[in-house]
């Protein structure tokens, strides 16, 4: 049981390049999230998808787009990468309303030169 | 959104009990309190969750006073492997989960 799988684990881009980060879950959870974590800081929400077919902006959505392809998959796209987007990106899932915690992948470490 | 405040860092020695307190003065009636642990190069991992009074599991205890304006995560007899960042979250759970807000957390260092 893989849980939440993120690919790739590491990536180096040049400024202006585009890239899609992939997230897949096998827990049948309704909601999925993308966070970024900068050194010494907590996680900041970029976008989330409450359910299949819906997406909404989080705290820091500028420079990103997302696609909830189906219930299992939620991708994050950087159309024109900037050095300020160098960060570790985490995908998370949540089963839905009720006292259940989020489940996280192990992150994608992205460096933009 | 209920804002949380935690100490930025704490040091402890192996075998000691560690208590990390989180303040959440504007917690709402339907908010739960959840604690996560994060190791380097890993995503946060759920430790414990509670609404009021005391909750205990095989890893930790969570103490919540009657006014719910704070909570304390208690780690009994810590080991070196408990060195991690600990996050306190306060979120209402009758919504679509858009208010899972992570602060900077508490960096716990366990020394031999």
Image: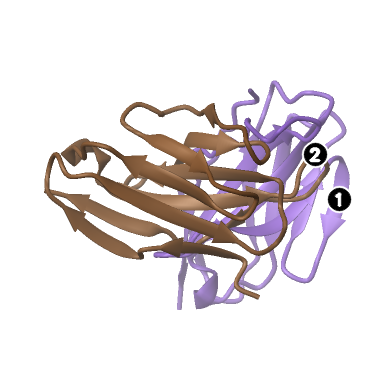
Chain colours: A brown, B purple
Say whether residue B104 is visible: no
For label 1, count other residues whose C-alpha is less than 10 Å away and answer few (under 14), some (14-19) or many (20+): some
Image quarter where the C terminus of chain B lies is bottom left
| Residue A16 position by quadrant | top left
| Residue B78 position by quadrant | bottom right
Say whether residue B31 is visible: yes
Q: Residue at x 17, y 44 (%)?
A: A17
Instruction: Tell me the SS state at disc 1.
Output: strand
Q: Residue at x 49, y 40 (%)?
A: A67
Instruction: Tell me the SS state at disc 2.
Output: loop
Q: Residue at x 21, y 40 (%)?
A: A81
Q: Which residue is mark 2?
A: A97
Q: Nearer the viewer, residue A11 or B105?
A: A11
User: Seen in the image, is A83 located left or right of residue A102?
Assistant: left
- How far apart are the alpha carbons under marks 1 and 2? 22 Å
**Which percent across, then down, holds residue A76?**
41, 44
Q: Nearer the viewer, residue B80 or B17?
A: B80
Q: Residue at x 81, y 31 (%)?
A: B94
Numbered-mark total: 2
Q: Which residue is mark 1?
A: B54
Kindly identify which chain the residue marked by label 2 belongs to. Answer: A
Q: Nearer the viewer, residue A101 or B63?
A: A101
> Residue B85 got which mark?
none
**Which percent across, then down, holds residue B81?**
52, 75
User: Seen in the image, is B108 located left or right of residue A102?
Assistant: left
């Amino acid at each position: 049981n893989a849980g939440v799988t993120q690919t790739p684990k590491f990536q180096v881009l040049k400024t202006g390049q585009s890239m899609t980060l992939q997230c897949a879950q096998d827990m049948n959870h309704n909601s999925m999230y993308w966070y970024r974590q900068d050194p010494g800081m907590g996680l900041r929400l970029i976008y989330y998808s409450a359910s299949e077919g819906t997406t909404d902006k989080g705290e820091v959505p500028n420079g990103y787009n997302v696609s909830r392809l189906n219930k299992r998959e939620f991708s994050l796209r950087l159309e024109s990468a900037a050095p300020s987007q160098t960060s570790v990106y985490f995908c998370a899932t949540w089963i839905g309303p009720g006292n259940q915690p989020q489940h996280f992948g192990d992150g994608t470490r992205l460096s933009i030169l | 959104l209920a804002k949380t405040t935690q100490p930025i860092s704490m040091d402890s020695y192996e075998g000691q009990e560690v208590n990390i307190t989180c303040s959440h003065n504007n917690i709402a009636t339907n908010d739960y309190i959840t604690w996560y642990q994060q190791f380097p190069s890993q995503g946060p991992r759920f430790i414990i969750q509670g609404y009021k009074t005391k909750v205990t599991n095989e890893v930790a205890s969570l103490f919540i006073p009657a006014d719910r304006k704070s909570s304390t995560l208690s780690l009994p007899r810590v080991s070196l492997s408990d060195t991690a960042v600990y996050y306190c979250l306060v979120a209402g759970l009758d919504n679509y989960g858009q208010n899972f807000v992570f602060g900077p957390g508490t960096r716990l260092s366990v020394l031999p």
